[in-house]
Amino acid sequence: MLKKWPRFIGESGKLEEQLRMAIQLSDRLGAMYSEARYQSDSVSSFILKNGTLERINLYKSEGIAIRIIVNGSLGFASTNDMRNASIRKAVELAISSARATKGLAVPPVKLSEEELSRDKVVVKPRIRFENVGFDSAVDLFREADAIVLKASSSKNVKMASRILRVDSGLCEKLLITSDGASVYSSIPRTSFGYTLIGIHPQKGSAMRSSTLGESRGWEAIERWDVVKLRRGG
C-alpha cells in the first residue's frame, strides 16, 4: 500500500530553454508571431467500490503546444514528446499548416495591442497531498462509505452500488511568446465524487451522484467534511 501521495514538479528552468528554442525557430522560419505553451498535469486518485479499494491511479501527462501566425494565417501543432527534436518538428508542422491555409483567413489574423506580462502565479496548498498518509485518506472515505451503508439500511434501502472517488493533482503551465510575455502557473486541484444506487422494496431503485472540486490542497477535503456530508445525505 502506498504511504504518500506522489509529487511531481516540472523543471521550469529546462522547460523555459525548450520553449525559447521553439520561439526562436519559429522566428527563423518566418512566423510573425509565435507562442509556446507547456502544460503538465500530475494526478493521483483512488476509487472505493462497495467499501473496497478497487483502483489506484498515479499518472503524469505533459506536452508542448505551438501556435504561430504566418502572413495572417494561424498554425498550430503539439507534442507530448519532450525531446528537442520533437519540439522542433512541432514548430515546423505549425509553420507548414499556417502556410497551407494562406489566404483563407479573411480578414487576416492579427493580434491586438496589449500590455504584456512576465509573472508567476503559484497557489500554495495549506496541506500538501504528499504530506497526507495514503492509508489515512482511504480510511476516511471508508468511514463515509460505512455511514452510507448504515443510513440506507435504517431506511430499508439495499445499496446495489456505492462508488466514491478522490482525485488530487497539480497543474503546471509555462507560456512564452515572441513579443515578450512569460507566465508560469502552478495550481493544485482536488475533487471528490460519489455515485450511489439503492433499491427500496416498495419504491424501486434510485441513483444519486455528486462531485465537488476546488483549486486547493487536502484542506478542501477537510472543509467538505465528507463524513458529515454522508450523514446528511
Image (tube, rainbow, N blue to C red):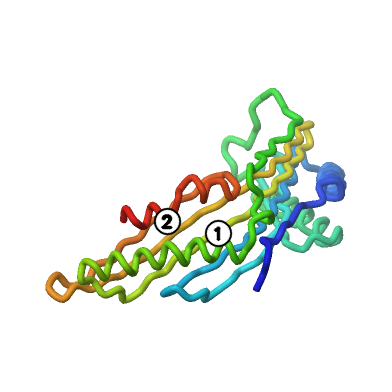
Residue at figure coordinates x 17%, y 72% from the top left: 204
Image coordinates of residue 47 in percent, x first then y, are 51, 69
Left or right of residue 148, residue 102 in this image: right
Q: Earlier in the sequence, mark 2 or mark 1?
A: 1
Residue denoted by label 2? 227
Q: Is residue 43 visible?
A: yes
Residue type highlighted by circle 1: Asp
Left or right of residue 198, residue 124 in this image: right
Left or right of residue 31, residue 189 in this image: left
Residue at figure coordinates x 70%, y 56% from the top left: 78
Does residue 27 sit above or below 194 in this rendering? Answer: above
Image coordinates of residue 174 in percent, x first then y, are 74, 44
Q: Which is closer to the viewer, label 2 or label 1?
A: 2
Total labels: the figure holds: 2
Left or right of residue 185, residue 50 in this image: left
Residue type highlighted by circle 2: Val
